[in-house]
Image (spheres, grey):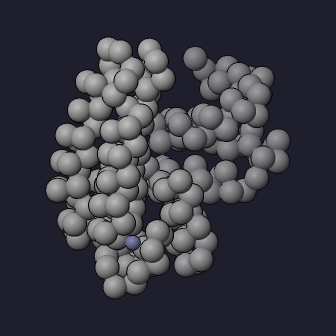
């Protein structure tokens, strides 16, 4: 497809579709296509923040960036208990919920101090224990898997106190929100609480 064809396509796309491209594909698209995307965003006045977000997503995250983010995020007050003494870690919390024949699972990243992350795993397990098992056939299977995985995550990541792979993945996944708010502690705190919810 020629650049002119791409430009014509982008002009036909809805705002939602352009936003989706900016969000999901900006990292992989070639420079010339990014310029077309940016000029279409500017033409429609969709906002400078979107152009900045594209630039952030396209900039490689260096080792130094990861370390700087780790320093910043691990030393912030815990988003759950506000403790400033314990370091924050990142973990994954699973939950299983059954409703007769449907069994629904969630697996979400959470950032907080070790005690609070342990507490999240405990309440997810209690939830799963009471609400997870009774969907047939998947309820019991997914419930057992949830207990097993939560235990693994708790042991491996809740008390890690270092830049581990889940912390790296958390920074990668949320780079736009983090980069846009890193200068402002209150805004960054709000972003973290939102990401945890
Ligand atoms: Zn806490």
Q: Position of residue 190 (x, y in %)?
A: 59, 67
Q: Is residue 85 visible?
A: yes
Residue at point 34% right, 85% down?
85
Counting labels gives 0
Residue at point 23% right, 55% down?
154
Q: Position of residue 4 (x, y in %)?
A: 68, 24
**Name of the residue lying farthest toward the right:** 44
Q: Position of residue 131 (x, y in %)?
A: 41, 34
Residue at point 32% right, 54% down?
122
| Left or right, residue 30 beside residue 20 | left
Instruction: Say above or below: 23 vs 155.
Output: above
Of the pair 45 and 84, the residue shown nearer to us: 84
Q: Position of residue 197 (x, y in %)?
A: 53, 53
| Left or right, residue 144 beside residue 100 | left
Instruction: Say above or below: 33 vs 169.
Output: above
Quadrant hosting ligand 1: bottom left
Of the pair 149 and 131, the residue shown nearer to us: 131
Q: Is residue 70 visible?
A: no
Name the image quarter holding residue 103.
Answer: top left
Position of the N terminus by quadrant: top right
Of the pair 1 and 183, the residue shown nearer to us: 183
Residue at point 55% right, 70% down?
188
| Left or right, residue 113 beside residue 163 | right
Name the image quarter holding residue 6.
Answer: top right
């Amino acid at each position: 497809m020629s650049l002119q064809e791409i430009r014509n396509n982008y002009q036909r796309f809805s705002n939602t579709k352009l936003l989706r491209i900016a969000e999901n594909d900006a990292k992989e698209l070639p420079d010339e296509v990014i310029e077309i995307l940016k000029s279409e965003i500017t033409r429609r006045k969709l906002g400078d923040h979107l152009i900045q977000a594209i630039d952030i997503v396209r900039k490689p995250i260096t080792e130094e960036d990861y370390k700087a983010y780790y320093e910043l995020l691990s030393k912030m007050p815990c988003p759950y208990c506000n403790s400033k003494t314990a370091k924050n870690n990142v973990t994954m919390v699973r939950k299983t919920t059954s409703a007769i024949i449907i069994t629904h699972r969630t697996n979400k990243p959470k950032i907080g101090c070790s005690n609070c992350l342990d507490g999240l795993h405990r309440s997810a397990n209690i939830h799963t224990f009471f609400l997870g098992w009774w969907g047939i056939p998947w309820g019991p299977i997914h419930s057992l898997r949830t207990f097993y995985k939560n235990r693994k995550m708790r042991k491996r990541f809740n008390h890690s106190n270092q830049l581990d792979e889940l912390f790296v993945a958390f920074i990668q996944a949320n780079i736009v929100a983090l980069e846009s708010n890193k200068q402002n502690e209150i805004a960054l705190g709000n972003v973290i609480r939102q990401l945890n919810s």
